[in-house]
């Protein structure tokens, strides 16, 4: 049975964003979008994911699944961040630069600024640790350590990838 659908595209790039039932169009703010009204049977046909100009409705038999590089890279980013948060990465690099500059007796404005920055960060971390200890030790709070959250993310990352991209076997 054919259904009326509204395909939503980015107003500036014409890139496909998502699909709505025509009856739902008034529930969304579409000011920065352009739309295309189509009608097809979702059991036998699908929008190929193409942009406003080149995209089209195709039969399921013709459809070539699109794997978005951003989705795969996003999963990789989450895995990295589950192990090394951005602030930890930056602090490690800054500390390495300071160690190298000291061992080679390098100085200058940039090194001085970096030393000041790292001293400020150390002070903030110490203050932050005192807040964490206050919550850890307070009977009215159940303080959760970052590692507990990261363990959960790490343990469930494969399931999240499968949910986002669908379960497919890929030979590497």
Image: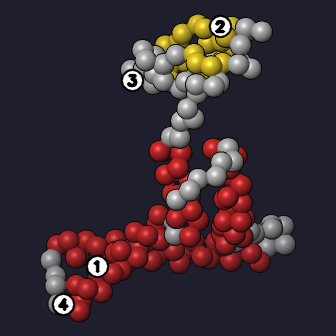
For label 3, the residue is: 13
Residue 165 x %, y %:
63, 44
Residue that protrudes farthest toward the right in the picture: 139
Residue 63 x %, y %:
58, 27
Q: Nearer the viewer, residue 2 or 112?
A: 2
For label 1, the residue is: 97
107 over 153 or under it: above or below: below
Q: Residue at x 71, y 65 (%)?
A: 155
Q: Name the N-terminal-most of marks 3 and 4.
A: 3
For label 4, the residue is: 104
Q: Nearer the viewer, mark 1 or mark 2?
A: 2
Q: Name the N-terminal-most of marks 4 and 2.
A: 2
Residue 149 x %, y %:
69, 65
75 sits to left or right of 137: left
Task: Tell me how far mark 4 sits from mark 2, CA to CA.
Answer: 69 Å
Tell me whether the residue at label 1 lies in contact with that at label 2, contact meaning CB atoms closer than 8 angstroms.
Answer: no
Q: Which mark is residue 39?
A: 2
């Amino acid at each position: 049975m054919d259904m009326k659908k509204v395909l939503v595209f980015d107003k500036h790039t014409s890139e496909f964003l998502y699909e709505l039932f025509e009856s739902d169009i008034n529930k969304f703010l579409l000011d920065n979008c352009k739309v295309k009204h189509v009608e097809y049977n979702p059991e036998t046909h699908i929008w190929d994911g193409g942009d406003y100009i080149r995209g089209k409705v195709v039969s399921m038999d013709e459809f070539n699944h699109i794997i978005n590089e951003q989705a795969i890279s996003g999963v990789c980013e989450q895995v990295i961040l589950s192990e090394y948060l951005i602030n930890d990465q930056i602090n490690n690099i800054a500390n390495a630069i300071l160690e190298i500059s000291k061992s080679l007796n390098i100085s200058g404005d940039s090194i001085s600024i970096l030393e000041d920055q790292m001293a400020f960060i150390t002070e903030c971390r110490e203050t932050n640790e005192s807040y964490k200890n206050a919550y850890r030790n307070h009977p009215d709070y159940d303080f959760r350590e970052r590692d507990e959250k990261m363990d959960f993310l790490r343990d469930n990352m494969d399931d999240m990838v499968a949910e986002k991209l669908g379960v497919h076997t890929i030979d590497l």
